[in-house]
Amino acid sequence: MDFWKRVGLFIYRFRVTFTVVLLACAISLTMFAMKLPSILHGDGFRTDGDQEIAKEILAEDFKQSSNTLLVVFEKEEGVTKEVFQQEMQKVVTDMEKAEHLDTIVHPFNSPDKWKDDIAYAAMIFEGATNEEEIKHALAFADTLKDTSNKNVKVTATGFPVINDEVNAMSQEDLKKAELIGVPIAFLVLLFSFGSLLASILPIINGALSVISTMGILYFIGDYMSLSIFVLNVTPMIGLALSIDFALLFVNRFREEAKHLSVKEAIAATYATAGRAIMFSGLCVFVGLSGLFFFQIDFIQSIAVSGMMVVIFSLLFSLTLLPAMLAMLGARITKEGIIEKWLKRGGDGAGFWRKFGMFVMRNPVKMTVLVVLFIAVSLLPIRQADLQFPGVETLPSSSESRAAYERYEEAFNADAKDYAMATIVVETDGEVEKNLSAIEEFVRDVKEDEHVKNVTSFYTYMDGVDSTTLELMLQTEQRATVQPVLDSFVKDNRTYVQVTLHDGPKSSEAKAWVRDFKKTYEREDMTLFVGGMTKFTQELEDEIIEEIPIAAAVILGSTFIILMLAFRSLLIPFKAIVMNILSLSATIGIVFWLFNGGQFGLEQGAVMFTLPVFIFGLVFGLSMDYEVFLISRMQELYNETGDNDYSTLEGLVSTSKIITSAALIMIVVTGAFAFTEILPMQQMGVGVALAIFIDATIVRMVLVPSLMKMLGHWNWWLPFVERKPKRTRSS
């Protein structure tokens, strides 16, 4: 007996046990799923490198913490400078009394923090851990919410506040997406099955898969840093995938149960739909596993959450779902009122047959049209603007985003026009014993043609050179320079601020920070480069360097899986090529949509990681339809040996279910286009668009066209002989 049938019969035999045990596991994981948001860490856009080392040193030694709470003061219109000053003084006095406060600079102890109608204060809080610092900062930020009045607007911003707001919005966006996606998905299922009972099962399957995954992620969070975006990615993938799997399985079971007993129908469904689901899930799993090669927290968070939800989707779809179907039995096959009503309009097979015959009569023309569409869609890639998201992750209506942007414009305007880098310098001994080496280093950097300005402790010494400074440190004059040294020096470490002539996102600036250590490396000091340009350069380099190996793993593994599934060389090769073309077209359209702000979408740069995300995730997801479609064609070809017949009938018999499955996936993932967080908008639109193109233009037009043109070569595999069970004439 076929292996897959034996598994189906085993599940049928222990259907009650499977149902009770799996439901108990899912329920027990629910309490941990609810705790998941509490252990998530930021947006995840970080990778190990110089930037992280420099950031840690600057925070620990020089109080330049990324967890700094910024409090922005804005003078209301018509208010005098004196009143503005008085109002600020009241708030600053309270700020200086804040619990757990470590350091504070404000307009009254640092005048450069005040410019005309705007001023700011920077607060660093004590904490044994990074999380404690953030906790204390957020607690104080909460006390400032009602501080604004008719004279002054007071807004808390900075990384802790922005990150917390992104976290809160991610949870709200998840609820919003579910409220949009799940009801519409249910309606699609209802119109697909026509039965209320059959339509509920896929929703249950999806919900259990997502909840169980989020429960497991709570424990995984103890061992790796997980991005807050797993709250959105997990439901996006899990609901879409597990509902699709359940749709295929339930649909096939209802077909088989019309002429077989429930026991036999479970076995037959497992041998057909179950097998297809397993291979489909493996393709998705492999696609996501390729993301692990990118040592970036955000991408690895997507990889681990996606892979876990694929595992649970397969688990519930291939165990709990057939067990529940076995217990429901014939009740799941009964025609409901909706189904009877829908049948009055026909099942749509006639349309798909005519459509399939038209495509197969004109395979060359259809192929050329699809290729032209893809070519046009690729055009926007030439002018693509790819960036890593910053404060623009939040919507423009966000107060913390608006306050941060006003702070940047008033006090850090050069950051938009000139790249800046912070160089941490570690000397072999104390800095005070290496003053001449540091002076020489600073002088060399100043002479670089790309450098606009260099700031070091020498900048504030009124022209004092290293020799004079050494003498001053040995006399009473030390007191005059000590405050500067306290700001710039800690034991054997100091830092240098470098401003370049080149823009912060320019290739020249990225090349400069990339090569800085090679250019200025010295035996007597160790250098670490930090700053936003360095941050961007390291992330971009990590992605670019790892793309070849990630692509090789994804494409190679997918080829092997599909070759084993269909016993063919051409079918997996075609599937991979078609996927690459359709996903490239998707990325081109996404660039056009967001770079141009089309259809009311917020105009902005596309996330640098989005193409990687789409290829890693959707490459596997879109294989669902390839596997569903080709599996039915393979069944028919194995029976008849007639390629044209199996292609047409396979298309006709699966078109309705593939269309429904694609529509569900489009609805569930596309619902995230209505969220507030920009990266999630882009992901939702990108995935939904990729599925739409793949399930319509590619699977319904390009696949049958190529199947027709290649004939029996579709099913060729060396040393494998196919003997049809019967011929068409028999």
Image: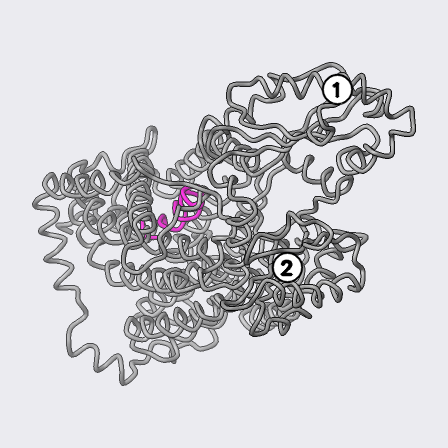
Q: Could you tell whether 586 is left or right of 201 in the image?
A: left
Asked whether 477 or 444 is in front, the reply is: 477
| Residue at image coords 18%, 48% | 701
Q: Identify which residue is drawn at 40% across, 66% down.
A: 264
Earlier residue among tags 2 and 1: 2
Residue 428 position (above or below residue 328): above
User: Where does the magenta region start and end?
Assistant: 610-626
Residue 77 placement (x, y as % from top left): 49, 67
Residue at the limit of the structure toward the top, as seen here: 523
Could you give the CA–CA distance between mark 2 and mark 1, rounded to whole angstroms?
37 Å
Residue 689 in the image: x percent, y percent? 31, 53
Q: Which mark is residue 71?
A: 2
Could you say which disc has been placed on residue 265 in the image? Answer: none
Of 416 and 235, the residue lying toward us:
416
Q: Residues within 10 Å of mark 2 (few under 14, many from 20)?
A: many
Q: Position of residue 151 (x, y in %)?
A: 57, 71
Is residue 617 covered in magenta? yes
Give the residue type at disc 2. Answer: Val
Identify which amino acid the numbered label 1 is placed on: Asp
Mark 2 or mark 1, whichever is nearer to me: 1
- Residue under pointer 1: 465
